[in-house]
Structure formats: structure tokens, C-alpha cells
């Protein structure tokens, strides 16, 4: 088994040219091809015809807006691309839940960007749309990231309205987080670049700065509903157009001629923001992993119950394969150690999927958390919090060990300690699921419920 040497580098000992490695590679290449094909469909949103309709209104699509907003030669890191995947098909589907969200650099400042996709049911909010927006806002809130909203939405998708607005993690939570972010000094900028109707009309005015393009609309009820409700006949422009809100209601701060001018103005506003607090994380010069990432398709077995050596995975993720292991001879079904990724320090907790042979003790199953492993991980998590080192959890976990020996060793108490350490962790956390993640093992490894 490869292990850290005296210089704390993992030395890879796996043969990546065996027939089984070739079979793994072939299987994962087929999976990657399928994922790329599915993603290409999702990125089209509501399809080419709806994209053409958007362009006919002299408006850009959500992804086109984001591409023009972020710094050139940088990458937009999209979140939740597969949200609502194969859901709402009786209504024609909602690719990416009708909203594009992710991280991008604007004037060298990392920002969260949330953009309604008007090609998907006019940017309407489905139940999963709310959850996706809330997830993006929560990440921004936890990491104090400026947040940009590019609004082009007809409001709640009415056939499903009873599932959209009432619960804790539904539409109203978006406004709650708007207010909480503002109170914490997190800058929020909204550009209204199409329709902003009904309950959704509150979002822009709960942010710090509001821009609005000509031809867009911002109102609680559109002209047709106003006529039906109170008999008043009024045009959309007079009711809630950019000129009205700029000159009469004073609701917006900046009137813009086009999408392009609004996006340029947002960049200027971001550039004027005060500098963020200095990060407590100490970055060093980045080094490439010692072994190529492409090997991972040969190392990872496609049969989920097969064992593999997690050291080989870590060696292809961290800078120069350097991994300073914590208590490496104790609790071996969980690997804990310090490393750098892209120059940033990180504490890694990873399930070892290789069976462990111990002297004088029964073998331990890979992917299972034993008492010693949980105790070690709990102490390691607390140590990383003490030194403000971000955490990376690499999941391939079946759960906690069961049986007489496990119960006698105090597995329940040790597991509770690990879950407690994860729950009280205040450093940034990332969960990477590379295999299975089941039951309480998912909780201990910082599953979704533990705010990674």
C-alpha cells in the first residue's frame, strides 16, 4: 500500500495498465460522454426556439449575460446544473430549474451570480428553483461573497404555486436571506433585464443597488391583472417600466439602455466595492499534483463494492502528492491529513476503501467507520478548526460498523463525537462523493445536512 514517505509525499504504486484498469477507464469514459451529452441539453435551457425569441427582444440569455459579466479569460463555476433533472416533465421540464447560479470573478472579486433563464417558462420559479437560489445565497452568506442577481422572471409557476411559497426552504426564504445578507454587510446588486412580476418584484428592492433595462417591467400585478382586479387600463411601461421607476417611484437606482450597458455598469459597481477582509487562510505557491488526474478513471472501479486504495486518489488531487497524515497508524479506515490544493491549505478526511489487515485484530472493512476511525476524525476536525484550515471530505462510505465488538468499543459514542465535530465546524467545508455515501456515515462525512 502506498503511504507517505519521510518527505510526506504519497508514492503511487498502482499499475494503471492492467486489464481491470483498462476496463475501468472504458466504463468511465462512456459515463463522461453521457454526462457531457446530458449537460449540453441542459445548457440549451428552453431550447433553440426560445433562445431565438429572447434574442428577438434584444435580450441575452442567462448564460450569455454571465459570460459578458465575468472577467475575460476566467471560468464561471456553475452550481446545481442538474437541479430539477427529469422533473416537471408533465409541464415540459425545467432544465437547471430555470436559473443559472455559480461563482465567477468580476473585477478580480469572487462573486456569486444568480441569473433567471427566461427561455425556461419565462424564468418562472418552480419548487426546485427556490431551493437552488437559496442554496446559492447560503453559500454566498457563509463565505461573505458579493451577490449579483440578473432578474428575468415571470414569477412563480402558477400550476405549482402551492409547493413554491409557504415552507421554510421555499420562495419566501429568498427574501429572508436578502435581508440577512444585507444586515451582515454582504453587497447585493440586482439588474432587472426583463420581467419581474408579483412576489418576485420584492427581490430587487431588498438588495443594495438596482439597475433596470429599458423595455423591462417591475410590478406586483401586470396590466391584464390590474384591469381584471380594479378595472384600470394601463400600459406595462406606465405601470412599471424603467422610466417610471427611475423618475416617479424612485424604486431603481440606474436606468440602462440594454443588457450590455447594465452588465458594464455592474462591473463598475463591483470595482467600487470596499476590499474584503484579509482571508485567515494562508496560501502558498501552487504546485501541480505529482500524478495525472486522468489516471483516476483507471483507478476507480466501476463496480461500487470493489475495493481500491484511497491514497492513490489523494495523490492525484493534492499539490505534489504531499499529504501530512494525522495518526496514520490508528483508525485506518479513515485517512486524515494536511495538504494543499492550488496552494490553499486543506484538511482531508477520506474513507479508505481498501480492507485493513491489523496485527492481533480482525480485518477491517474498507468504507466502514470504526470506533477508532471516528475518534481520530473528530479530533482532526477540531484541530483544523483551531487552526482555521478548510476541510475536504472524500466520501465512499457504507456507514458505521455494527456487531458485538463495535458496540463494546463504544461505536455510538465515537460516532456521535464525529457528528458533533462536523456540526460545530466553522471553517469552509467541501464534500466530494466519489462512490457511495449511506446512512449515518453520510452525516459523519459532512453530508448535505451539515452545510458543506
Image (cartoon, helix red, strand yellow):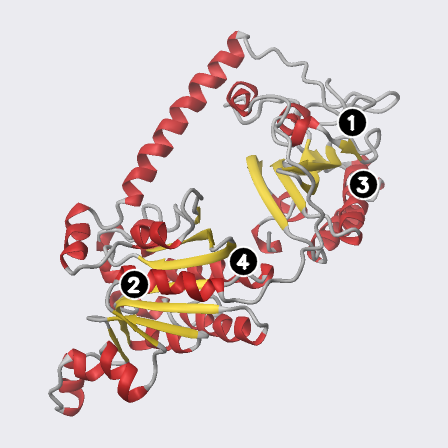
Above or below 26: residue 386: below
Near mark 2 (Cα within 10 A), the count class, few <14, some 14-19 or many ≥20, is: few
Residue hosting label 1: 8
Mark 2 and mark 4 lie on one chain; the one further toward the N terminus is 4
Which badge, 4 or 1, is on the more N-terminal residue? 1
Q: Position of residue 114 (x, y in %)?
A: 40, 59
Q: Residue beneath label 2, please?
A: 261
Residue 105 visible at all:
yes
Q: Quadrant of the N terminus?
A: top right
- Rounded to the nearest angstrom, the CA distance separating label 3 from label 1 is 19 Å
Mark 3 vs mark 4: give the one in front. 4
Residue at position x 58%, y 62% in the image: 144
Find numbered disc 2 in the image and state the secondary structure of the residue it sits on.
Answer: helix
Q: Which mark is residue 376?
A: 3
User: Are dots 2 and 3 in contact, CB under 8 Å?
Assistant: no
Q: Could you tell me which secondary element the residue under label 4 belongs to?
A: helix
Q: Is residue 225 something one can see in this rendering?
A: no
Residue at (28, 80) in percent of width and height: 220
Q: Which residue is identified by label 4? A: 139
Amino acid at each position: 500500500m502506498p503511504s507517505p514517505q519521510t518527505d510526506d509525499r504519497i508514492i503511487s504504486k498502482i499499475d494503471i495498465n492492467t486489464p481491470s484498469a483498462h476496463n475501468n477507464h472504458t466504463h468511465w469514459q462512456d459515463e463522461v460522454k453521457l454526462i457531457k451529452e446530458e449537460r449540453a441539453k441542459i445548457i440549451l435551457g428552453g431550447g433553440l426556439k426560445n433562445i431565438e425569441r429572447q434574442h428577438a427582444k434584444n435580450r441575452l440569455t442567462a448564460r450569455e449575460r454571465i459570460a459578458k459579466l465575468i472577467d475575460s479569460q476566467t471560468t464561471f463555476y456553475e452550481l446545481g446544473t442538474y437541479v430539477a433533472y427529469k422533473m416537471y416533465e408533465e409541464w415540459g421540464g425545467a432544465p437547471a430549474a430555470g436559473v443559472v447560479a455559480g461563482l465567477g470573478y468580476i473585477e478580480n472579486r469572487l462573486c456569486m451570480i444568480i441569473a433567471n433563464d427566461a427561455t425556461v417558462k419565462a424564468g418562472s420559479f418552480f419548487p426546485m428553483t427556490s431551493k437552488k437560489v437559496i442554496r446559492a445565497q447560503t453559500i454566498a452568506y457563509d463565505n461573505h461573497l458579493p451577490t449579483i442577481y440578473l432578474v428575468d422572471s415571470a414569477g412563480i409557476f402558477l400550476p405549482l404555486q402551492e409547493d413554491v411559497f409557504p415552507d421554510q426552504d421555499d420562495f419566501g426564504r429568498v427574501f429572508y436571506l436578502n435581508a440577512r445578507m444585507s444586515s451582515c454587510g454582504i453587497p447585493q446588486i440586482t439588474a432587472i433585464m426583463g420581467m419581474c412580476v408579483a412576489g418576485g418584484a420584492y427581490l430587487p428592492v431588498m438588495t443594495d443597488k438596482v439597475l433596470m433595462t429599458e423595455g423591462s417591467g417591475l410590478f406586483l400585478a401586470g396590466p391584464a391583472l390590474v384591469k381584471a382586479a380594479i378595472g384600470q387600463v394601463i400600459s406595462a411601461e406606465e405601470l412599471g417600466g424603467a422610466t417610471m421607476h427611475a423618475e416617479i417611484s424612485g424604486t431603481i437606482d440606474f436606468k440602462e439602455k440594454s443588457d450590455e450597458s447594465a452588465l458594464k455598469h455592474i462591473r463598475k459597481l463591483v470595482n467600487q466595492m470596499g476590499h474584503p477582509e484579509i482571508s485567515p487562510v494562508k496560501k502558498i505557491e501552487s504546485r501541480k499534483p505529482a500524478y495525472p488526474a486522468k489516471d483516476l478513471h483507471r483507478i476507480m472501479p466501476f463496480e461500487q463494492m470493489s475495493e481500491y486504495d484511497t491514497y492513490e486518489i489523494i495523490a492525484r488531487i493534492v499539490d505534489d502528492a504531499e499529504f501530512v497524515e494525522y495518526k496514520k497508524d490508528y483508525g485506518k479506515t479513515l485517512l486524515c491529513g494536511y495538504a494543499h490544493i492550488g496552494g490553499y491549505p486543506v484538511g482531508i478526511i477520506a474513507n479508505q476503501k481498501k480492507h485493513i489487515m491489523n496485527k492481533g485484530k480482525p480485518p477491517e472493512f474498507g468504507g466502514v467507520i470504526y470506533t477508532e476511525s471516528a475518534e481520530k476524525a473528530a479530533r482532526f476536525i477540531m484541530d483544523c478548526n483551531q487552526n482555521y484550515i478548510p476541510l475536504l471530505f472524500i466520501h465512499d462510505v457504507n456507514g458505521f460498523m455494527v456487531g458485538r465488538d463495535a458496540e463494546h468499543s463504544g461505536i455510538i459514542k465515537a460516532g456521535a463525537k464525529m457528528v458533533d465535530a462536523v456540526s460545530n465546524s466553522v471553517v469552509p467545508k467541501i464534500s466530494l462523493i466519489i462512490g457511495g455515501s449511506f446512512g449515518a456515515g453520510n452525516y459523519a462525512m459532512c453530508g448535505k445536512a451539515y452545510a458543506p
